[in-house]
Every structure is written in C-alpha cells, then in structure tokens.
Image: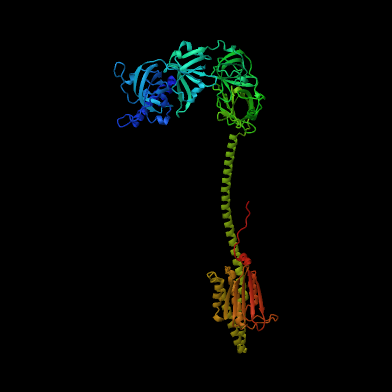
C-alpha cells in the first residue's frame, strides 16, 4: 500500500511535495499497525506457513489474500528504484515476473549483512538497478496490486538485465502489467511538466490504438520537448499504475530509469506544415493504413480566441484546438493548424498544435438556426443513411434568438436563453472575456452569435442519440449579443412589486371598510336604540292615552251612569217623602243597589289598574284569580280549561279580557240563572280565543230588551273587543244557555302592545 502511495508521487508537482510527504508518513504508520496487528505473539508472522518463492505466485493473489501477510522469500534482479532521497522502494523481478517492494513502509528494520559480514541498517542499504537481491517479508494488499513488505534484504551482486517484453500502450491498461518492465514504441504528443523532486520530465505518448500513457524520463538536452514531440520513440521502463482514492485505475505511467532506455527512433518532421492538409470533417475517418498518432494538418478561419483554446471553422465544420496558446491570433485570421487529434469526447478535437497564420480576414457569418433544429439534427445524424453528408453544429459559429431568463448583471457571468418552444440554452463567455459592460434586463429578446458546443449525452462508452444533447453557446465578447426587443416595463420584478402594492392597498381598504362597517354598525345601533326608545315612549304615550280614554269611557258609561241614576233616585226620594213615603222608600232602596253596584265597578277598575302589572305571566292563572275574586259565585260553578301552548298576553289586553270574563260570568249568574259556566282559553297558532258557555235560561236574540239597571250589557263587551281589534260572537237560545266567543289575532296584539323592530336599508 505504501509502495503505491509512493507511486502516486511520480505524477506530483513540486507544490504537492509537502502534501505527499504527509501521505507517506500516514501510509507508513498504517502499515506498522497492519504488520503488528497480524503478527504472532513475538511480533513476527506465523512461521508455520511455507514462504512463497516465485514472484508469479505472489501476483496470483487477490488483494484480500495478500492482506493476510503471507511469508515470502524471493530472489531476483532490481529493475527500478524510486529514485529520490529518503525513499528505498524498488521493484524486483525473477524469471516469472516482477513485484513492488515497499521498503519505505517496513515497520521493523532488520540488520542485513554485506559482503564483508558487517551489519547495516536497512535505511542505509544501497539498492541499485541491476543488483541481485534476496527479499524476505510478508505480502500486503498494496495500493493497487499486491506488494512485498520486506523484513530482510540481502544484496548478492550485480547480474545482467532480464529480457523485456514488447507491448502496446493499450496493453498497459489491463492492470496486470503493474510493476513489470516493458518496451513501447509510441509517439510523443505532449510535454506535461518538469518534476524537480523526481528529477524527471513527464511526457505524454500515444500509440496507433489511440491510447495514452505518461513516460517519465530524466531531462537531457536531446529530449527537450521541441526535439521529441511528434517523434517516434523507443521506451523501456517499469509500469506504475495511477489510481484514485478508491484504488481504481485511472491511468498508467512508465518510469524510464536510464537514459539509454529512451531513444528517438524517428525524429519529428522539420516542417510540420509540409504534410498533406486534411479536411476538418475527416479528422478521424477511416484510412486504409490506419489512423496516425502523428500531427495532422488542417486549414480554416479562426472564429474564437481564448486563453488556451482556439476554434477554427472550414466551411460548415468547426473544430476546437486545445492546449494551444493564441500567440497574437485574431478572429478572422486564416490559419494552418498542425496538431494531434484526440477523440476523448463525442467529437474529435486538436491538441498541442502549432498554428501558422496565412492571412488576416473576417470571420464567417454566423449560421442562423434554432436550438430545436440543432437537437433534431443530432437525432437525424444518428439515424442517417451512410451515404448522406450530415449537418453538424458542434464548434460552429451560429446565431440563435431567445429570451433572457433572469437579469444578467455586469461581467462575464453565464446566463440562459429560452426559445419560443420553451427549450433553454446556456450562454457563457470565454475565461478571459470581460463580459457585459452593463446589465441586461430579464425578458429581453436578444440575438446571440457564438460557438455552439454540442455535447451528446453518453450511454455507456458511446453517445446516446435517443437523448437530447446538452447545448451551450460560447461568446467571444459582449458584441456578440444584440438586443432585439426590450422587455415589457411590466417585468416579473415590477409585476411582483405592483401585486404586492395592490395587495397592500386592498388589504388597507378592506381593513378600512371593516372598521367603517363596524363604526356604522355601532352608530346605527345607537340611532336604532334612540329611535326605538323614542318610539317606545311614543307608543307608551299613545297606549296611556288610549287607556285614559278607555277608563274615562268606563267611568262615564259605567260608574258615572250608575251614580247619575242613584242621584236621580235620591232626588225623587226628597220629593216623594212627603206625599208618597212608600215610593220614596222604594227609590231609596233602588239608589242603594245602584251605589253598591257602582262600588263593585270601581273596585274592578282599581284591580285592573293596580294589580294587573304584578300578576303572574300565565293568563289562565290570572283568569282563575280574577274569577275567584267575585264573591257572589261558588267555586264549583265555574270550570276553566286551556288548549294549545300558552303564550304571553300583553297586560292591557289581559285586563280587558278579564273584565269581559267577569262581566259575562256575572250576567250568566244574575240574569241567566246559570248553575255551571265553562270558560275555555285556546292558545291557537294565529289567535287567542276566550269562550264563555253557561247552562242558563238564555235569551231570544231577536227580541230587544232594555239593559238591566246598573248593567253594561253586551254593548260594553263589544266595545272592549273592538279596542283590541278582535271579534266577539254571542250565541243564545231560550232554555239552552248562552255562548260568548272572543277571538284576538296575535299579530294585532303585538302591533298594539309591543314595539316592533325598526326597519332599515343598508348597502
């Protein structure tokens, strides 16, 4: 594991040295814990297991099996050393294979003996390429492939190098070539960096298969980048697998330890522009002799100049030139480009190119199109016939119209456009572009000219034509954006502010209306209360006036008439006392009777005035009490019945009915000679009925008789009922008694004796 942590340092930069040094320490501590935890009671591995002696047998182990720390004792030739001070890792090979020895991670340092028999610390052991050594130790899972954690190392001597296998770069990606010494014949395509810590130069090489690998060589004048790029070279070195934090292979690096292991077989062409020009549309098409890993020469017009990228267009095809400085080129320049073709994306591009300017000019006119047309073209290209020339928009200068989504601030921030059909496209500036000098409002309709970047979505190792591609537009500057239509003043923000303001005004208006309604309601209630009080007072006054008139009528028609009759009799007594004493005595007796009757009438009126207000609310009980006060009748002569649900009867109406009932009962006993009187009170839904039925002698209604002396008669009863807006019916027949029926409508009673609610109209 730690040995392969050291391998990761082979691709580090000087600025990463401190970080990787910490990583070495962490790996070393981890292996110490690992070794101690799996050792026996004395700190050593279980010696009962026979050690593995062939490197091929160790490499057959899986990572899980190698982690069990199986004893090993191998003998082989050192083929590679880490090559920096303080690191002692190396690879050792026998006739079956090679393996990584993680000396730096060994937790227990054993004292080996040199040829003179002296013991030396392992850290001072001088292991060099070509030496034959014996290594005793334990297996470990390593960082990528199994390694040996050494316990003892003994140098035997120097021996000839072992044969090396000739492979292709593609073979290195199988993973099984880790730590093996191989020979390659690739083409150098790029000088990646200089690594002063490892004292090497990393070159990127490519084979005809299109696979890439890193090659680490010791810097020398003869392998300067301008002397080896695009050259066919011979490489002999040890394969070191590059892996990520998940221990997954992400690349390979071939470490070349000696200068004679890196040779130029065919130098790069003296004039890279002397090779035949190929069309941009034919970069990776079929060729009978196979695709060349060397530089290809293309021609076109520059449509984009960025910090480390160019885009050129030839006809209706555009191509990206990556990892190439602009060197003073301008948009519109006609150029020749000699570079390496890579197809790591869905569309091939050029990298590490040499650009030659032929002439100045203007860029081609952008092709007006739509996002929908680009998407449809991608789908048609996937289903097209082989002999149909496809239309292609990738890295082509196009013009698209759309509506800006969201406000675009000053500067080079990316933004989105939306087409009429709702599709969106991202628009961004190049890294070195200053962007917009002023903001663009959301909703603006703009025409945008730029480089279309069409990225077909992947479905495994190939592009999936069933899915819509990702499309973005690369702008060269703010001059590529033209405002076609300013947004409506009613932007989303302003509309939001207007809606919020309107909602606030409506809320305030509603609140004001509610407060106003509450105020109006309270004021209306006050006015209504005042009007009701005034009306009640007026009604009370009218009622009192009517009552005074009624009392005056009763006094005039009843008591006053009786007193007048008594006065007349008394006056006649004075005249007859001297000439007819017997007639005078008779008139005196009659006057006495009249005065007694007047006294009874006054008593009844006083009872109706003073005691009715404090009477019980039940009219039937009130009737029982009124009839009981009549002293000239027996209790069993009068029977009182009630029908219906009792309802409250206005006091003044109740008083009139009680007086009427007393008069009717008194007449039935006095004149009708009745022995049984039925008084029925019926509380109907719409009216109150009072029925007085006696079993007296009755009378003939067709014969008019004078009213008995001192009596009111039926006329007074009718007057009382008429004042109450009711009806009275008298049924009588000689020998069959008399029946008096009084009907008073509830509506009339409420109208006369209650205050109805005021009517009002409200909007």
* Colour treatment of the image: rainbow
In percent of width and height, residue 588 lies at 59, 85
- Number of marks drawn: 0
Which sits in the foreground, 197 or 83? 83
Which sits in the foreground, 83 or 693? 83
Residue name at image x 31 percent, y 29 percent: 43
Residue 600 found in image quarter? bottom right
In the picture provided, is 474 more to the left or to the right than 66? right
In percent of width and height, residue 452 lies at 61, 25
Residue 277 found in image quarter? top right
Residue 80 found in image quarter? top left
In percent of width and height, residue 396 lies at 62, 23
Residue 698 showing in the rendered view: yes
Residue 563 showing in the rendered view: no
- Pick out the residue farthest to the right: 702
Above or below for 314 versus 739:
above
**Quadrant, the N terminus:** top left
Which sits in the foreground, 145 or 545? 145
Above or below for 469 versus 725:
above
In percent of width and height, residue 732 lies at 66, 80
């Amino acid at each position: 594991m730690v040995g392969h942590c050291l391998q990761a340092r082979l691709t580090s930069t000087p600025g990463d040295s401190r970080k990787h040094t910490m990583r070495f320490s962490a790996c070393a501590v981890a292996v110490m814990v690992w070794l101690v935890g799996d050792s026996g009671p004395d700190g050593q591995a279980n010696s009962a297991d026979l050690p593995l002696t062939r490197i091929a047998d160790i490499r057959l182990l899986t990572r899980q099996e190698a982690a069990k720390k199986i004893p090993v004792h191998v003998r082989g030739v050192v083929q590679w050393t880490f090559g920096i001070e303080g690191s002692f890792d190396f690879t050792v090979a026998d006739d079956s294979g090679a393996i990584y020895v993680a000396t730096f991670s060994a937790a227990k340092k054993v004292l080996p003996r040199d040829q003179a028999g002296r013991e030396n610390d392992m850290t001072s052991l001088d292991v060099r390429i070509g030496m034959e050594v014996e290594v005793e130790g334990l297996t470990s899972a390593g960082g990528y492939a199994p390694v040996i954690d050494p316990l003892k190392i003994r140098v035997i001597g120097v021996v000839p190098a072992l044969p090396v296998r000739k492979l292709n770069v593609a073979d290195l990606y199988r993973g099984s070539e880790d730590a093996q010494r191989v020979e390659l014949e690739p083409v150098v395509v790029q000088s990646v960096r200089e690594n002063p810590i490892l004292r090497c130069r990393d070159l990127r090489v490519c084979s005809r298969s299109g696979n890439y690998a890193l090659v680490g060589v010791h810097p020398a004048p003869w392998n300067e980048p301008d002397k080896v790029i695009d050259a066919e070279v011979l490489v002999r070195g040890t394969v070191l697998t590059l892996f990520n934090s998940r221990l997954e292979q992400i690349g390979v690096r071939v470490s070349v330890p000696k200068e004679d292991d890196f040779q130029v077989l065919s130098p790069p062409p003296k004039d890279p522009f002397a090779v035949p020009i190929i069309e941009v549309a034919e970069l990776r098409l079929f060729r009978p002799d196979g695709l060349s890993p060397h530089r290809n020469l293309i021609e076109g017009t520059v449509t984009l100049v960025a910090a480390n990228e160019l885009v050129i267009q030839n006809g209706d095809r555009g191509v990206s030139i990556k990892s190439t400085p602009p060197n003073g080129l301008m948009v519109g320049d006609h150029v020749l480009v000699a570079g390496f073709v890579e197809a790591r994306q869905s569309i091939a591009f050029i990298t590490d190119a040499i650009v030659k300017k032929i002439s100045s000019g203007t860029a081609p006119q952008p092709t007006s199109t739509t996002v929908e047309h680009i998407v449809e073209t991608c789908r048609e290209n996937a289903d097209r016939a082989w002999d149909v020339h496809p239309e292609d928009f990738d890295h082509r200068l196009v013009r698209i119209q759309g509506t800006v989504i969201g406000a675009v601030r000053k500067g080079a921030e990316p933004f989105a456009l939306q087409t009429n059909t709702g599709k969106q496209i991202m628009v961004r500036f190049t890294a070195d572009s200053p962007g917009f000098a002023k903001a663009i409002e959301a909703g603006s309709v703009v025409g945008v000219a730029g480089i279309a970047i069409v990225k077909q979505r992947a479905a495994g190792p190939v592009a999936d034509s069933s899915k819509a591609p990702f499309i973005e537009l690369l702008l060269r500057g703010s001059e590529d954006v033209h405002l076609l239509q300013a947004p409506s003043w009613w932007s989303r923000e302003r509309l939001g502010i207007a809606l919020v303001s309107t909602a606030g005004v409506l809320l305030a208006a509603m609140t004001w209306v509610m407060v106003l309604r509450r105020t109006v309601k309270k004021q209306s209630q006050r006015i209504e209360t005042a009007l009701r009080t005034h009306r009640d007072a007026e009604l009370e006054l009218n009622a009192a006036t009517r009552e005074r008139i009624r009392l005056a009528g009763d006094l005039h028609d009843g008591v006053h008439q009786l007193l007048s009759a008594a006065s007349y009799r008394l006056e006649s007594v004075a005249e007859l006392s001297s000439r007819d004493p017997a007639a005078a005595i008779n008139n005196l007796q009659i006057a006495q009777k009249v005065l007694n009757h007047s006294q009874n009438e006054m008593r009844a009126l006083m009872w109706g005035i003073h005691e009715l207000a404090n009477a019980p609310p039940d009219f039937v009980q009130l009737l029982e009490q009124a009839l009981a006060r009549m002293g000239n009748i027996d209790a069993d002569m009068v029977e009182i019945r009630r029908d219906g649900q009792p309802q409250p009867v206005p006091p003044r109406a109740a008083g009139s009915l009680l007086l009427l009932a007393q008069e009717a009962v008194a007449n039935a006993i006095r004149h009708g000679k009745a022995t049984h009187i039925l008084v029925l009170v019926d509380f109907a839904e719409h009216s109150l009925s009072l029925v007085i039925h006696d079993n007296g002698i009755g009378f003939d209604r067709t014969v008019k008789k004078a009213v008995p002396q001192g009596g009111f008669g039926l006329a007074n009863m009718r007057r009382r009922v008429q004042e109450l807006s009711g009806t009275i019916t008298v049924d009588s027949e000689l020998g069959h008694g008399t029946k008096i029926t009084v009907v008073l409508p509830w509506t009339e009673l409420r109208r006369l004796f209650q205050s109805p609610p005021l009517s009002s109209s409200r909007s």
